[in-house]
Image: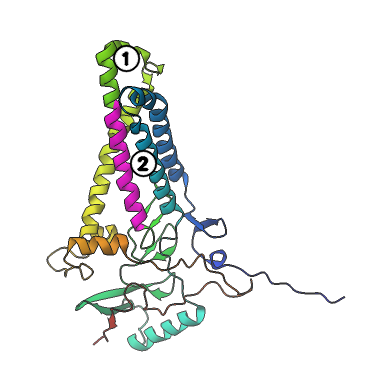
C-alpha cells in the first residue's frame, strides 16, 4: 500500500509570529494578557445588574417604563462595542519574507556603505513626502520592514500595527486603524451609560426619601450596612464617571485633529521645531469623517492560506514602503 501524504491547509492566523491568541477560526484576535479585560466585563455587567435589579423596578412603576428599556439598549451597545474592539484585528502589518528581508539589508548596506568596526551604523530611516511634508519611516528590526507612516511596533503584542494609537489593557488588545472607531464608540457610550445610571440612582434615592424619609430608605436598601448595594453603585459610577468622560473628551480632541495617542505623547506635531500634522484636513468635520467613517482593509488574520504547514512563516504581501492608507498619496524622496 502506498502511503498518501496529506498536508493540511493553514490559515494565516495560525502562522502569525506575534504574541496574540486566536479563537473562532481566527475571527477573534486578542493579546495574551486578558486579565484586565475580564475585570472590565465584570465591572460593566455587575454595575448594570445591580441597577436593573434594585433601581429599575421602582423607576419603571413610579416614573416611566422607558427608563429600563433605554438602559438595556445602551448596555447592549456598550458590550457590543467592547467585544468588537477586543476581538478585532487592530491593523497588524505582515512581516517581511526572508528573501525580502535580505534584499532590504543589501539595499541598506549599499546606501550606507561599509561601517568601520567600533562605530555605530547610521539609523535606518527612509523619507516619504505627504502633503508637501517630509515624514520619516523607521525600520523595524523585528518585522524586518520599514514601517508605514503612523505605524508603530507594540512590544506587548510583538506586532507592527497600522495607525497605532495605544495598547489598551482594559480591552485586552491594541487600538489601531481597524478598531479605533469601535474603541471610541465604546468609551463614548460607556460614558453615557455611567451618567445615565448615576443620575437615575440619585433620582431613585431622592424619590424614596421624599416618600419614606432618608433613614427609612437607607434601612430598606438591600444589603448589609455599610455594604448597601445602592450606595456601592453610586460610588462605582461616581469614580468611573470622571475617568470615562475625561478619556472620551481626550479622544474627541484627538479625532478633531486627526491625531493618535502615540503621536500626542511623543509630540510628533507639536513644539517649535515640529512641522504641522500632514494628515489633518484643517477641518474638524473632515477629520472626524476620515477617522470614524473611513474605509478599512481586510484583516490579514482572516484570509485563507493554501501553503502547507512546512512553508516559511507569514510574509508581507505589501512592499516595504506600501500602506493601504498612504500608498496612493506618498512619494519617495531620495536621500541627498
Residue positioned 21% across, 67% down in the render: 280
Relative to residue 187, is residue 79 drawn left or right? Answer: right
Residue 220 position in % (x across, y down):
37, 13
Q: Which residue is mark 1?
A: 217
- Dot placed on the residue nearer the N-terminal end, 2 or 1: 2
Residue 134 position in % (x across, y down):
22, 77
Mark 2 in CB contact with mark 1 (< 8 angstroms): no
The kind of secondary structure the magenta stretch mainly shows is helix
The foreground one among 126 and 284 is: 284
Q: Against 214, is 90 above or below? A: below
Label 2: how many residues lie within 10 Å, few (<14), some (14-19) or many (20+)?
some
Residue 268 position in % (x across, y down):
22, 65
Q: Quadrant of the N terminus?
A: bottom right
Can residue 223 be seen at all in this image of the molecule?
yes
Q: Is residue 197 magenta?
A: yes
Q: Which residue is mark 2?
A: 74
Residue 55 position in % (x across, y down):
36, 25
Residue range highlighted in magenta = 180-201
Residue positioned 54% across, 68% down in the render: 12
Residue that protrudes farthest toward the right in the picture: 1
Q: Is residue 42 magenta?
A: no
Q: Against 153, is 200 above or below? A: above
**Residue at mark 2 to residue at mark 1: CA–CA distance:** 28 Å
Numbered disc 2: secondary structure: helix
Amino acid at each position: 500500500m502506498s502511503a498518501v501524504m496529506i498536508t493540511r491547509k493553514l490559515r494565516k492566523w495560525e502562522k502569525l509570529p506575534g504574541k496574540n491568541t486566536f479563537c473562532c477560526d481566527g475571527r477573534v484576535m486578542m493579546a495574551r494578557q486578558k486579565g484586565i479585560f475580564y475585570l472590565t466585563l465584570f465591572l460593566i455587567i455587575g454595575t448594570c445588574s445591580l441597577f436593573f435589579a434594585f433601581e429599575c423596578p421602582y423607576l419603571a412603576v413610579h416614573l416611566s417604563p422607558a427608563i429600563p428599556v433605554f438602559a438595556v439598549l445602551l448596555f447592549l451597545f456598550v458590550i457590543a462595542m467592547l467585544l468588537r474592539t477586543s476581538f478585532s484585528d487592530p491593523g497588524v502589518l505582515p512581516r517581511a519574507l526572508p528573501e525580502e528581508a535580505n534584499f532590504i539589508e543589501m539595499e541598506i548596506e549599499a546606501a550606507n556603505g561599509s561601517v568601520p568596526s567600533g562605530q555605530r551604523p547610521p539609523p535606518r530611516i527612509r523619507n516619504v513626502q505627504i502633503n508637501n511634508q517630509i515624514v520619516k519611516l523607521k525600520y523595524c528590526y523585528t518585522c524586518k520592514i520599514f514601517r508605514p507612516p503612523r505605524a508603530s511596533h507594540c512590544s506587548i503584542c510583538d506586532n507592527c500595527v497600522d495607525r497605532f494609537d495605544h495598547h489598551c489593557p482594559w480591552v485586552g488588545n491594541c487600538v489601531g486603524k481597524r478598531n479605533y472607531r469601535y474603541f471610541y464608540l465604546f468609551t463614548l457610550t460607556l460614558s453615557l451609560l455611567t451618567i445615565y445610571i448615576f443620575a437615575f440612582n440619585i433620582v431613585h434615592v431622592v424619590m424614596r426619601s421624599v416618600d419614606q424619609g432618608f433613614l427609612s430608605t437607607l434601612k430598606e436598601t438591600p444589603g448589609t450596612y455599610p455594604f448597601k448595594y445602592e450606595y456601592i453603585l453610586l460610588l462605582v459610577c461616581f469614580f468611573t464617571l470622571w475617568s470615562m468622560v475625561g478619556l472620551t473628551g481626550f479622544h474627541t480632541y484627538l479625532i478633531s485633529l486627526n491625531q493618535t495617542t502615540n503621536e500626542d505623547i511623543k509630540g510628533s506635531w507639536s513644539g517649535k521645531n515640529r512641522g504641522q500634522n500632514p494628515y489633518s484636513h484643517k477641518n474638524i468635520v473632515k477629520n472626524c469623517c476620515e477617522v470614524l467613517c473611513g474605509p478599512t482593509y481586510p484583516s490579514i488574520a482572516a484570509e485563507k492560506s493554501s501553503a502547507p504547514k512546512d512553508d516559511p512563516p507569514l510574509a508581507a504581501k505589501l512592499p516595504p514602503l506600501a500602506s493601504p492608507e498612504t500608498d496612493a498619496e506618498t512619494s519617495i524622496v531620495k536621500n541627498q
